Structure formats: C-alpha cells, structure tokens
Image (cartoon, grey):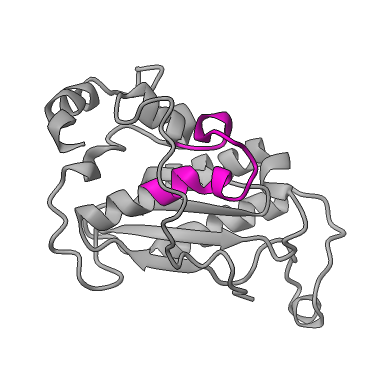
Amino acid sequence: MRAESGRIARTVCLLNPANPLAHVGWVEQRDTHRYYADMTNYRRSRIDGASYFFTLNLADRSLSLLTEHIALLRSAFEYTRERHPFIVNAIVVLPEHMHAIWTLPDGDNDFALRWRLIKTVFSRGLPHGERRSDSRQNKGERGIWQRRYWEHLIRDEADFAQHVDYIHINPAKHGLVTRVADWPHSSFHRYVQTGVLPINWAGDSSVELDCGERRNFD
C-alpha cells in the first residue's frame, strides 16, 4: 500500500465535486487521505476533527430495512451532511447493521448529533407498525434502531487501515456474497475506482475485531 502512495495521492488530488467518481459508494472527495495522514495525535475519545469507527444495528435484527430502503438511508446521510458536514471515509450497509468511518471537521466532535439526525430522518421515512418495547411506547419512540451504537476512536494509520478492511470484507464475512466486489452497498467500489484497492481484493476474513455488531445496544 505505501509503495503506491504517490500514485494514489495524485489520483486523490484529481477528485472534486464535479468528478462523477466523487460520490461513488457513499464516499466523498478526500476519502482516502487517512491511509497516508499522520494520525499519531488520536489518543482520546471525542477529539475535535478526529476519525471514528461506528457500528449501528437495527432493533430487530431479523429485518432488512437498511438495504430494502437504501435510497432513504442515503437521503438521510445527505440531509445530515448538508447541515452538519463530515467526511465518510469508508462505509458498508448490510441488511440489519452498518459500519462506517467518519472524519469530523476541525473544532467539531459531535458525532452523536449527526447519528441522531440520520436515524431520525430514516425512521420518519418508514411506515409505522414495527415492534416496540413498553419503554419505547411509553416514550413515544420508534422501534427501528437500537438506541445506542458502537463507537471507536481511530488511534493511528494502522488502526484506520485495519477498520477500513474490516468494513469492506464484512458482507463476505457474513456470507452475503462470495466476493467483496459483489456487494453493492459499500465504499469498496470507491476504493477500486480511485486505485486504492484492486477489484479482486479479498482481505483477510480471519481477522477478528470487536466492532460491536454482536452486541445489544438497546
């Protein structure tokens, strides 16, 4: 990866909002910069301008709302980013959970506000009728998302790269596809388009990270 950094950096410099590749696979311009950036200052949680890895789960893990309503989810992201900017460095959306890496603007650490808005906009676009606990009913809450989510502060470049790989291999790891490239709802396609990864990249499915997808955050 490092040996190709010069070529990739030149590719990234070509990215701009007018470029048709600028929003391929959910990821906007400057998405690949963290492969080469100095991230040694990331040591505490909720650091202004830091990068974070997230896992969000549906309340009912037997549903496939995220992929069945992928356009609504994308709109929720766009709505939120217009009001509270952030960079999506990597993302994958599976039927009942999603993983993402964000980088927040300098002077900003409020990822909670952004996720709250994304979850609210997505939920409002869905018909009512989902199962809700007594607690949710008493509070007038929808039952779409688990209330809390997994958040991990990216510590350095190696940690960033490891979590990007985890994101991209996740659909194959869950048996949804045999090839990483076959899953459509992933920033992997962006990384291929910009020359960071080859189309036949397979990663290492044996790598285990505690990324919160088996936990209940309700």
Nearest the eye: 49 or 91: 91
Q: Quadrant of the N terminus?
A: top left
Q: Position of residue 79 (x, y in %)?
A: 52, 43
* Residue 168 to residue 16: above or below: below
Left or right, 91 with reference to 34: right
- Magenta stretch: residue 170 in it? yes
97 and 208: which one is in front? 208
Residue 51: image quadrant is bottom left
Residue drawn 22% across the image and 22% down it: 11
Q: Position of residue 166 (x, y in %)?
A: 43, 51
Q: Is residue 122 above or below residue 17?
A: below
Instruction: Looking at this view, name the residue that lies furthest to the front.
Output: 206
Tell me which corner region of the image, top left, top right, bottom left or bottom right, holds residue 12: top left
How far across and how far down the image is residue 198, in percent?
36, 26
Q: Quadrant of the C terminus?
A: bottom right
Question: Residues in magenta?
Answer: 165-187
Residue extending farthest to the right is 129
Q: Is residue 94 magenta?
A: no
In this view, the residue in front, 191 or 177, is 177
- In this rendering, would 129 be left or right of 117? right
Q: Height in image: 123 above or below 150?
A: above
Residue at x 35%, y 17% (from the top left corner): 19
The answer to whether residue 22 is seen in the rendering is: no
Taking depth in this image into account, of 209 and 37 the one nearest to the observer is: 209
Count the marks. 0
Name which quarter of the figure residue 29 lies in.
top left
From the viewer's perspective, is 180 left or right of 137? Answer: left
